[in-house]
Amino acid sequence: MANQAELDLHRASVEALIKLDSSDPRRQAIEKMAQLNNINAAGLQDVQVRPVQVAPKESAPVEVRRFSDEAREALTKEGYAIYALSGQSIRSLRESGRKLWSTWHRDSQYEAFETKGSMVSEVAVKPDALFLPESNNETLKKQEDLIAKFSTDLGKKVKGVEAIMGEAPDYVGVAFAHLDATGDRLFGEKYDHNYARTKTPTVDSNVARVGDFNAVIGLSVNRWLRDHGDSSVFASPLVVPKS
């Protein structure tokens, strides 16, 4: 039977052990010391090894970039609707019950595309002018140039904002946010089921396009060649706080 000093030593060793990872050199040293002391475990029935409870690490709250009060007021007067995107991906939106009728991006080879998060920012769109006039039948580069010019012109009227061509999850997020707020399907029948070109690569020289929002089967996320135009693929500027 171990004497009291040995028991006290072992209790202290156990208390130290449970706080250390198995690969920690300090744990290995304590275990070796216990072996050298050759303490009979039968005499240590009152010593219980309990796992250390570690509180889960709370993720920091996501801070959404927001428009200034002045910009918000000016955009509202111009007819813009403002929504906050929080970094959700196409997959997370779909898994939450959002309807997307296109299925190609669910394949494992498109994992990065499906899980790409939207921007974390307020975004403004003008439903009555969702697409830039005569911006269809143009290449990706030309449509980006048209949005850049639109951004310059808008910045003269509304300070602290800029217009950009967004990523696929940005347009998907805005479409569903607008649906929730108004019941209106951006890119739906009212918009001739047209698409917004995005700058998100898919495969080869393709980039994603978002549109054709069907009332029954949902929104489409499709692909189109960046160097080719189409009558249904437009430049659709997203207005964000200027970085």
Image (cartoon, rainbow, N blue to C red):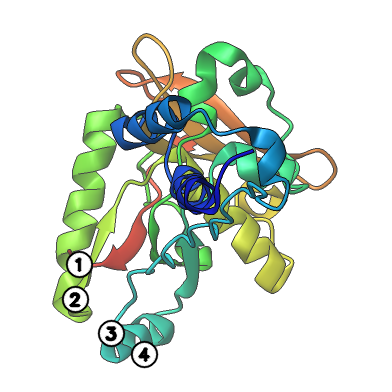
Height in image: 226 above or below 214? above
Q: Residue at x 49, y 45 (%)?
A: 6
Asked if the residue under mark 2 is in contact with the one under mark 4, i.e. CB atoms within 8 Å, the reply is no
- Which tag, 1 or 2, sits closer to the chain's start? 2
Residue marked by disc 2: 160
Height in image: 62 above or below 206? below
Question: What secondary structure is found at the residue carrying circle 2?
Answer: loop
Q: Which residue is most to the right?
A: 216
Asked if the residue under mark 2 is in contact with the one under mark 3, i.e. CB atoms within 8 Å, the reply is yes
Q: Amino acid at mark 3?
A: Ser
Residue marked by disc 4: 73
Asked if the residue under mark 2 is in contact with the one under mark 1, i.e. CB atoms within 8 Å, the reply is yes
- Which tag, 4 or 1, sits closer to the chain's start? 4
Give the side of residue 157 with respect to residue 199, left or right.
Answer: left
Question: What secondary structure is found at the residue carrying circle 1?
Answer: loop
- Which quarter of the picture shows residue 228? top left
Q: Amino acid at mark 4?
A: Glu
